[in-house]
Amino acid sequence: MVSLLHAQGHTLQQMADELNEAGYRTRRGKAFFPMSVQRLLKRATKAATVTL
């Protein structure tokens, strides 16, 4: 979901808000913040390049 929102041009804050409103939580059960979304995007990008 984060990759899709990022592709649509959403800011980190907008992505965090969308995730929180949809009921998503971090792996520790906390709400998302812009920095946690940035880390998630970084991990997703890294994983995508490894599988290619």
Image (tube, rainbow, N blue to C red):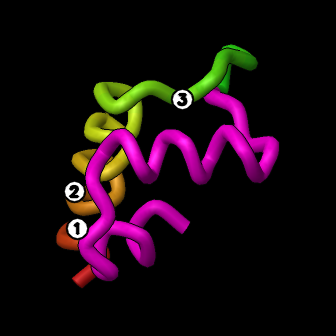
Question: With respect to residue 20, does 11 lie above or below?
Answer: below
Q: Residue 14 colored magenta?
A: yes
Q: Nearer the viewer, mark 1 or mark 3?
A: 3
Q: Amino acid at mark 1?
A: Val
Q: Residues within 10 Å of mark 1 (few under 14, many from 20)?
A: few
- Taking 2 as reference, is 28 above or below it? above
Element assignment for label 3: loop
Q: Image point 22% across, 56% down: which residue? A: 46
Residue assigned mark 3: 32
Q: Position of residue 22 (x, y in %)?
A: 76, 52
Q: Nearer the viewer, mark 3 or mark 2?
A: 3
> What kind of secondary structure does the magenta stretch mostly adopt?
helix
Which of the pair 25/44 is nearer the observer?
A: 25
Is disc 3 in contact with disc 2, using a CB cutoff of under 8 Å? no
Residue 30: image location, x then y, percent: 67, 16
Q: Give the residue drawn at x 44%, y 51%.
A: 15
Give the secondary structure at mark 2: helix
Earlier sequence position, callout 3 versus callout 2: 3
Give above or below for 26 relative to 30: below
Residue at which label 2 appears: 46
Q: Is residue 28 above or below residue 40?
A: above
Residue in the picture at 24% in, 62% down: 45
Question: For mark 1, what is the residue?
Answer: 50
Cα distance in 3D space between marks 2 and 1: 6 Å
Image position, residue 34 (x, y; %): 34, 32
